[in-house]
Amino acid sequence: MHPAEIASQAPDRLAVVMGDSGESLTFRELEERSRALAVAWRRAGVSRGDTVGILLENHLRFLEVAWAAQRSGLYYTAVNWHLTPEEVAYIVSDSGAKVLVSSRLNLATAEAAAAGAVDPAGTLKVLVDGSAPGWRGLDELIGEVRDAPLEDECEGDFMLYSSGTTGRPKGIRRALTFPPMGQGIVGATGFLRMLEMQLGQVYLCPAPLYHAAPIAWSMGAQRLGSTVVVMERFDPEQALALIERQRVTHAQFVPTMFVRMLKLAPAAREGYDLSSLRAAVHAAAPCPVEVKQQMMQWWGPRIYEYYSSTEGVGATFIGPEDWLAHPGSVGRSIYGTPHVVDDDGNELAPGQIGTVYFEGSTPFEYHNDPEKTASTFDRHGWGSVGDMGYLDGDGYLYLTDRKTFMIISGGVNIYPQEIENLLINHPKVLDVAVVGVPNPDLGEEVKAVVQPVDWADAGPDLEAELAEVCRAHLAGFKCPRSFDFDPELPRQENGKLYKRLLRDRYWAAGAG
């Protein structure tokens, strides 16, 4: 299915509702506007297989722009609008974007990025909410071709860039085969069907649409005829209020959002009717077992989890009942056959920690980086994004950490996730990251960087409390040797932490 089919059945059903403003778009409007924009791009010389860059905050027009690209066989590259002009310019240039879509909020950055495009003079620049010299207004473009048909409609795909946590971001690109609309990659639609999403239900998107899961799941929900409620920015209490007000049936969160909701005052947590919610899904980052247990106690058995990646090298899924029987697992495979291997590529027995690979995944490449592409696959052709974990005897996958985040102290492997999962449950801790820092004797030692709930708590007393918690629950070699406090950790809005930035802070200084 796709929006054109939904528009023919229920044209006045809302396709998008913005959380703060309440602005909305019906399926008829989504269908008409995305089709007209696709036609306008064709007339401007944008051909199947070309790329559109999207530099937008969570905006009413975001999804109609994405659908215009999806239905015209294009790649669309949604760009994090918090990046610097130089970083955005790199992505726009590297992707070969022939169109750049922006809002007035991001106009200065977009201007700098457009100047660095492969063909600055030939790049079509589109502004979604106003006018500016050298930019075409979205409504103006649509008005010129509103009733024109799109003769060669076919499925495209997004090409999103890796977060850059370990270096320059790279575009994750799958080959386009241009199938007719409705016959493209199942993607998030398959997950949503597993969650029994039906025509007329409501999906809450609390995260930035420039990330893979938010855009894929939002468009997947629209393919199934559901309204997507888009939060302009995440606020824990507003998320609860929107579930009540919009009668949300499905939502996707990341673990840091769970933590922030759990740490609301009791009156806020208990003040909203959440009975419409059938399924809350989480992914993108590991969820501490105790956090998920607390969410289950609050929301009941409505919490599901999946593990995947933008690369699509494999996927697992687990429902609430299965998770309660296998706490901490990210589930069994629903796509690709998982393997856990050691550093020499030998497959490990159940319970042994190694690098997680998947056999039988969809081919992809890192755009303009064949070396990085080749490094993703082993001698069997199995693919990995560098996560570490183990399988149990029943085939359930457990993740321990990213290989690049593992700390090697005195020759012993230490997985920061275990320590972070312990500390995040302390009532005075809002966020935490554990990193390896230089040690002249051991090579690395363990440091915890903590964002307190109340900055007034930062200091020796809280450090002593946290150190005691670690000593009570962890082997001595795993306990942080030091604690630092930070008003806000460098975490992306999709929940992933820029650990490289923290590590660089200490390794550049050369001391713990």
Image: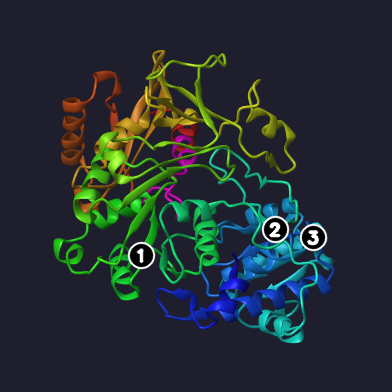
Asked which secondary structure carries label 1, the reply is: loop
Tell me: 257 left or right of 18. left
According to the image, label 1 marks what residue? Answer: 249
Badge 1 crowding class, 10 Å Cα cut-off, few under 14, some 14 to 19, many 20 or more, is many
Amino acid under disc 3:
Arg
Of the pair 481 and 244, the residue shown nearer to us: 244
Of the pair 344 and 131, the residue shown nearer to us: 344
Amino acid under disc 2:
Gly
Colour scheme? rainbow
- The residue at 29%/28% (across/down) is 480
Q: Would you say the residues marked 3 and 2 are in contact, meaning their CB atoms lie under 8 Å apart? A: yes
Badge 2 crowding class, 10 Å Cα cut-off, few under 14, some 14 to 19, many 20 or more, is many
Tell me: 67 left or right of 233. right
- Give the number of the mark in front: 3 or 1: 1
Tell me: 119 left or right of 506. right
Q: Main secondary structure of the magenta part?
A: loop
Asked which secondary structure carries label 3, the reply is: loop
- The residue at 29%/53% (across/down) is 302
Q: Magenta region: which residues?
A: 488-503
Where residue 425 appears, as percent x and y from the top left, is 22, 42
Residue furthest to the front in view is 9
Instruction: Give the answer, above or below, for where 218 lies relative to 257.
Output: below
Give how far apart the Cα atoms at labels 3 and 1 are.
Answer: 36 Å
- Residue 197: within the magenta? no
